[in-house]
Image (cartoon, rainbow, N blue to C red):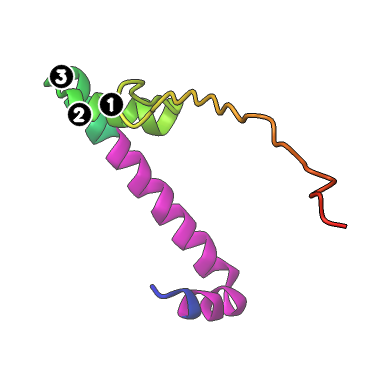
Amino acid sequence: MSKSLRAVGSSVSPLLEDALELGKDTQRQRLHEMLYDKALAKGDTLAALSILNSLHGWRDPKKGSVDVNVDVKVQNVMVVHDHGFR
C-alpha cells in the first residue's frame, strides 16, 4: 500500500491502521521464526548472522571497519614582518 493511500485510509479508519500494524507484526514474527529455525535446525550461518545483526546489533569486526590513525606533522611557519623594503 502506498504511503499516500495509507495516510488517507488511516485518517478514515483507525481499524485499517490497526490491521496494517497487525499484519506487519505477523509477517515480522514469521520471518524471525523462519530464520531462527534455519539457524538452529539446519546450521545456516547466514541466518544466524542475520538474527545477531538485527536483534543484537552485532557487526563483524573484520568486515567494514577500518582503524585509521593519522598523525599530521606541520612544521612551524616562518612569518617575516620586515621585508627590507623602505
Identify the element where label 1 is drawn.
helix
Residue 47: image location, x then y, percent: 22, 29
Measure the alpha-carbon separation of dots 3 and 1: 14 Å
Label 3 sits on a secondary structure element that is helix
Residue 20 vertical position relative to residue 28 in the rendered view, above or below: below
Q: Are marks 3 and 1 in contact (CB under 8 Å)?
A: no
Foreground label between 2 and 3: 2
Residue 66 is situated, as x and y percent measured from the top left of the image, at 39, 27
Which amino acid type corresponds to the residue marked 3 in the rendered image?
Answer: Ala
Say the numbered circle drawn on residue 41. 3
Disc 3 or disc 1, which is closer to the eye?
A: 1
| Image location of residue 55, percent across then percent down | 42, 30
- Going by the numbered disc 1, the residue's amino acid type is Leu
Residue beneath label 2, please?
Answer: 46
Give the residues in magenta: 5-32
Name the residue located 78 percent from the left edge and 43 percent from the top edge. 80
Proximity of marks 1 and 2: CB atoms separated by less than 8 Å: yes
Main SS, magenta residues: helix
Disc assigned to residue 49: 1
The residue sitting at the left extreme is 42
Identify the residue at image location x=56%, y=73%.
10
